[in-house]
Image: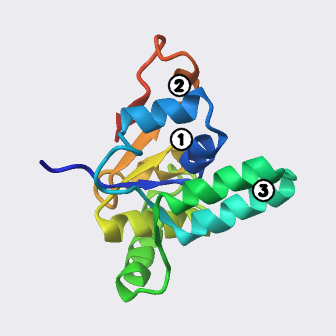
Amino acid sequence: MTTERYLLDTSVMLLLVRGDEPGRAIDQRFDLSTAPERPLVSIVTHAELQVLARRNHWGRRKLEALAIALSNVVTIDVQSGPLLDAYGAIEFASQRHRPSARPMSHNDMWIAAAAKVAHATLLTTDKDFTHLSPNDCRVVLIDPKALRNPNDAPVSRAL
């Protein structure tokens, strides 16, 4: 049996850390905590979550939840040659799509490059990655509003 490999964008990790209904719905929909292969994250996501924690003055319990969530994923660092090559390809692809595509932050390009190198599907709640799918990296856009009321709309759609 082949399971899909997922790389989680910072927005998805944040929902999982919060542990409320949207995070539980994502976990269940994509079998993140029960799949034999642990989900992936970029080291950039670690940094972005640390910034959010500081900016929002997270307390001990939320910081512990963050530490647990990050210990349950596999982290991709930015030091490998293939990842550097993938970053260049992602930035080039983003430039090809301007002005129709939203400009991507450098952090988002690192995250997309990590998904590309890992041959993983990028799970995200924001539209900054949509122009990359399916040619440069596979993206599944998760609708956070649908997670709050799953009867209204599909939770996600592959792009």
Give above or below for 117 relative to 147: below
62 sits to left or right of 45: right
Amino acid carrying mark 2 in the image: Leu
Name the residue beneath numbered marker 1: 125
Give above or below for 99 relative to 106: above
Mark 3 neighbour density, 10 Å: few (under 14) some (14–19) many (20 or more): some
Find residue 45 and report its horizontal and vertical position in percent: 59, 63
Number of labels in the image equals 3
Name the residue beneath numbered marker 2: 147
Marks 3, 1: nearer the viewer? 3
Find residue 81 and report its horizontal and vertical position in percent: 38, 88
Find residue 53 and name its label: 3
Q: Judging from the image, what secondary structure is the residue with disc 3 in?
A: helix
Q: CA distance from mark 2 to mark 1?
A: 11 Å
Q: Residue at x 66, y 40 (%)?
A: 18
Amino acid carrying mark 3 in the image: Ala
Q: CA distance from mark 3 to mark 1?
A: 19 Å
* Quarter of the image that includes the C terminus: top left
Q: CA distance from mark 3 to mark 2?
A: 23 Å
Find residue 134 and report its horizontal and vertical position in percent: 29, 51
Q: Residue at x 38, y 82 (%)?
A: 85
89 sits to left or right of 107: left
Find residue 145 and report its horizontal and vertical position in percent: 58, 24
Of the pair 133 and 83, the residue shown nearer to us? 83
Find residue 38 and name its label: none
